[in-house]
Image (spheres, grey):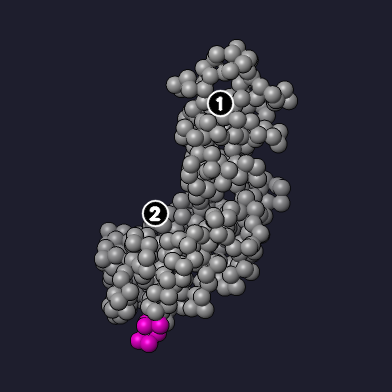
Amino acid sequence: MEPALRPETARVDLSRLRRNFEAVAAYGGRPVMPVVKADAYGHGPRAALAFEALGAPLLGVAFVEEGASLRKAGAQGAILVLAGAGPEEAEALVAHRLATVVATPRSQRGALEAARLAPGKVAIHLKVDTGMTRLGLAPDEAAPAARRLASAGCKVEGLLTHLASAAEAPETTDRQLDAFDAVVADLARQGIRPPWVHAANSAGLLHLRPTHTLVRPGLLLYGLRPRPRTPEVEVHPVMTLAGRIELLREVPAGTAVSYGGRWIARRPSRIATATLGYADGVPRTEAMARRGQLSIRGRRAAVAGTVCMDFTMLDVTERPDVQEGDEAVVFGDDPTAWDVADWAGTNAWEVLTSVGLRVPRVYVDDGREVEVLSRY
């Protein structure tokens, strides 16, 4: 195993990933389809393969390209393309043995074209829009679409919907699930009973129905809870994003720091330059510049000025213990990705998926490095 050339890393703890998966599976009481889109929420292909090794019956990606990438990384099991695929992607869908969601006229045409290329081998999941107002068939379109696709050689293996407010609005979520259950019942009356029926994202685990045969969490598996409502399941952050202190500098009062000079030393100050910036996953927002913090030696230090593409400056005036070469943690156990999200004015999903591809992923298992994934 070659070490990464760049010491800045996103450390991914596979033992925590396994424990999170097992905890979520026990809580849900049914099979788990991990959502591994956006490079497994920034955790990389090894994380997706770890879920497969744990027995996940499907992996959920957004696009065909993501599914193809997982095949190239070694994934052998079922992979579901959640955003669907058009006719121009049908050949790749078949070549990489990908199942696909049908939610739009284009994705219906894509499934039909794939079935023409490989009759009886293309699995589909029908998506019903029950209130997200994004993608999905109208409830009364589900049964006709299922019959049409089945007669063309597709295998109707799933039925799903997407919850818009599971972490925030239980009454709205219940209305969505009532509408979804009505579709499930309507299809069953017509003899259409897909083995996989799913609606529950991470927060949706609070709203499991007897009709659900599968859950598809994302954030919980990576060790972070949705807000404000969350299932009572113990999980721990899987990824730690960290750089190092490249330079320490004593500056006089009145010194401007970083682009635009918006942070000005009010006293003689000690400024640390950390080797991670917004190209690596440190949010570049005015709120982050005002309130953000990184952790050095187990204690937080405030961001000083605008986050740069490659560097972040920190005020360590009251931290004589900080030395050049120290690790600077953007998120992990402390701060968490939610802390960073709160400072930056975003959410934990965006923080995780913003970790740049140039940051090496270092996979550890029970404290031991097992793989380094680097672009260089």
Residue 139 appears left or right of 27: left
Q: Residue at x 71, y 47 (%)?
A: 367
What type of secondary structure mainly makes up the magenta span? helix
Residue 267 appears left or right of 79: right
Residue at the right extreme? 321
Q: Give the distance between the C-alpha atoms of the residues marked 1 and 2, in whole angstroms.
A: 39 Å
Quadrant of the frame with the N terminus: top right
Image height check: is 225 above or below 247?
A: below
- Front residue of 369/31: it is 31
Q: Position of residue 29 (x, y in %)?
A: 60, 73
Residue 94 appears left or right of 334: left
User: Disc 1 designates what residue?
Assistant: 304
Dot 1 surroundings within 10 Å: few (below 14), some, or many (20 or more)?
A: many
Q: Is residue 334 magenta?
A: no
Q: Position of residue 197 (x, y in %)?
A: 46, 74
- Front residue of 196/307: it is 307
Q: Position of residue 364 (x, y in %)?
A: 66, 48
- The amino acid beneath tag 2 is Glu
Q: Residue at x 71, y 51 (%)?
A: 366
User: Disc 2 designates what residue?
Assistant: 65
Image height check: is 39 above or below 77?
A: above
- Front residue of 92/124: it is 124
Q: Is residue 186 magenta?
A: yes
Q: Is residue 147 among what the camera can see? A: yes
Q: Give the mark, 1 or 2, whose residue is nearer the N terminus.
A: 2
- Front residue of 164/123: it is 164
Dot 2 surroundings within 10 Å: few (below 14), some, or many (20 or more)?
A: some
Please state the extent of the stretch shown in magenta in the rendering.
Answer: 185-190
- The amino acid beneath tag 1 is Ala
Q: Position of residue 151 (x, y in %)?
A: 29, 80
